Amino acid sequence: MDDTATRAGTEPDYLKVEHSLRSWLLTTDHKRIGILYMISVTGFFFIAGIFALLMRLHLISPEGALFKPETYNRLFTMHGIIMVWFFLIPSIPNVLGNFAIPLMVGARDLAFPKLNLLSWYLFMAGGGLAIVSAALGGVDTGWTFYIPFSSNFSKTHVYWMAAGIFIAGFSSILTALNFIVTIHTMRAPGLTWLRLPLFLWSIYATSVILILATPVLAITLLLIAFERAFQVGIFDPNLGGDPVLFQHLFWFYSHPAVYIMILPAMGWVSEAIACFSRKRIFGYGFVAFSSLAIATFGFLVWAHHMFVAGMSMYGGLVFSVLSFAVAVPSAIKVFNWTATLHKGSISYHTPMLYALGFIGLFTIGGLTGLFVATLAVNVHVHDTYFIVAHFHYIMVGGTALGYLGSIHYWWPKISGKLFPDMWGRLAATVGFIGFNLTFFPQFLLGYLGMNRRYATYAPEFQFLNVLSTAGATILGVGYILPLIYLLWSLRYGKEAGPNPWGATGLEWLTPSPPPKHNFHEVPEVTWGAYNYHDMEAQDGRS
C-alpha cells in the first residue's frame, strides 16, 4: 500500500477490522501488537478499578458496609496484583513502546517481530491465570505476597496467581530485550544518541531495569511455590526460614519496578512539554541521562521499605541517604520541564493538560517519598494510609495519567482520526480533581494513624473516608470518558493528517495511520531533537 492510498482514506492492513481474527492473532506488525496490548491492559485496568471501587464503597462505614474482612483482604490483594503487574508495568512500554519505537527510530518494525508476538501471548497467558485465580475466589496475601501468608497460612489460590505473574515476567523480559536491540541497532542514519527523543531514553532505561530485576522476582515466586509444595524452610519461620530474606528479594525487584512504571510516563511528558510549548527541552542531556541515573539508583534503595523489619540503625541510615539521592535525577526532570515551559508558546490541548497534571501529582508523590525515606517519619507512617496515598500519587497520578496522556498524544497517529479536544480537556480536568479528592485525604488519614489493609476503622476517620470514596467516583468518570469519546472518534472523528500537533520526530513524517512498513525509504536525520526553533523560523520565512 502506498502513501497516496493511505492519504486517500484507505485503511492500512493493521487497522482493518474486517480482516480475520487469525490475521490479528498471528500478526508480527508492531502496530497491531501495540493495539492488542492497548486492548488488554485497558481491560485489566478497569477490572482492577472495579475492585478498587468496591473497596472504597465498603469503607464508607467504619464497621465496613459490604464485605467480611476475609473478602476485603481478597479485594485489595486482587486490585493491587492486577493493577501493578497487568496494567502499571506493561501499560506505556508495551502499548506505546510497541507502536511508536520503530516509527521514532525510522525502522520498519522491532528487531524481533515474532518474539514481540510471543511476548503478547505470554502476557495474556499470565493475565488469564490471574483472572482464573480471581474467579476461583482470589488471593488474600496482599499484592506483596508477604511471608508467612503466601507460604503456608493462606488457603487461597496463591499457585495460580504466582504462576500468572511468573509467566507475565517473561513477557516483560522479551519486550525489553526487543526494545534495547531495536534502539541500539536500527536507528535511522544520522539519528545519534543525542538526537534521540527523550521517550526512547526512558524506554531504554526501563528495559534495562526489566531485564536485570524481573528474574529476581521470578526466582522469589518459584521459591514460594517450592516452599508451599514441599514444606522446605526458605522464608517461613515455622520451617526455619527467614521472612526478612523474602522482603529483601521482593523489594529488590519491586522498588526498581516503581521506575519501570514511571520512567516511560516521564519520557512521554518530555515529548508533550516540548511539543505544546514549542521549545527544545531545557537541558536535554541532563534529562536524558537522568533516566539512566534513576535506573541505576533504583537498584540501591529497596530496603527503605523495611525500616521497621529489624534493620540496624546504620543500615537504615545508608538506605535513607540513598533514597534521598534517587530524588535528584527525578527533580532534574521536573525542574527542566518547568524551565522548558518558561516563556514557551503554550497551547492547552488534551495531552498537555495530562502532562501538566502528571507534573503536579508526581511532584506531590515525590516530595512525600522524602518523608517515607526519613527514618523517624517512616516509623510513624509505615503501614498507614499515608503510604497508600504516596504510592498512588506516584503510580496512578503518574503512570495512569501518563498512559492516558500518551494515548491521546499518539491517538491521531494510531487511528488516523482526531478526538474531540473539548471532551478530552474535560476528562483530564475531572480526572485530576477526582484523583486529588480520592487520595489527598488519605495522607491525613495516615498521619492521624489509620492503618491500611484493615476492613474497619475508628469512627473519627469516617468523614475523610467518605470524601475519598466520593473522589473515587469522580475519578472513575474521568477514566470512563476517554474510553467513550476515543471509540466514538474511530467512526466520527475528523481525519488527523500526518502531524496534527505540529510535532517533531520521525513518527510524524509518516501518514496517519502509518503504512504497514512505516517508511518506504529509510529516513535520514539531519536535525537535533525537538528542533521547534528551526521549524518556527522556516514557517516565518515561508
Image: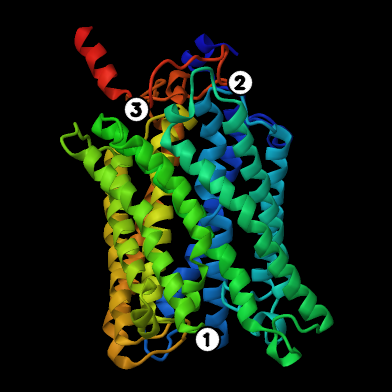
Image quarter where the C terminus lies is: top left
Residue 184 location, quadrant = top right
**Three-letter amino acid code at disc 2?**
His
Q: Name the residue: 50% across, 46% down.
A: 92
List the residue tagged with mark 3: 530
Mark toward the viewer: 2 or 3? 3
Split into 4 quadrants, where in the image is the N terminus?
Answer: top right
- Asked which secondary structure carries label 1, the reply is loop
Q: Earlier in the sequence, mark 2 or mark 3?
A: 2
The image shows a total of numbered marks equal to 3
Looking at the image, residue 386 sits to the left or right of residue 121; the answer is left
Q: How is the image coloured?
A: rainbow
Viewer-nearest of discs 2 and 1: 1
As helix, strand or loop, the secondary structure at mark 2 comes to loop
- Provide residue 160's location: percent of width, then percent of height: 73, 69
Q: Which mark is residue 310?
A: 1
Residue depicted at 26% across the width and 48% down the height = 335
Tell me if mark 3 has few (under 14), some (14-19) or many (20+) residues whose alpha carbon lies within 10 angstroms of its own.
many
Q: Nearer the viewer, mark 3 or mark 1?
A: 1
x, y percentage for residue 363? 30, 58
Indicate whether 294 appears above or below 129: above
Q: Could one spot residue 256 in this view of the protein? A: yes
What's the residue type where badge 1 is placed? Gly
Q: Which residue is at 68% across, 35% downward?
A: 24
Whole-angstrom CA distance, mark 2 to mark 1, is 56 Å
Looking at the image, residue 483 lies above or below residue 452: above
Is 116 on the left-hand or right-hand side of 446? right
- Residue 517 - label: 2
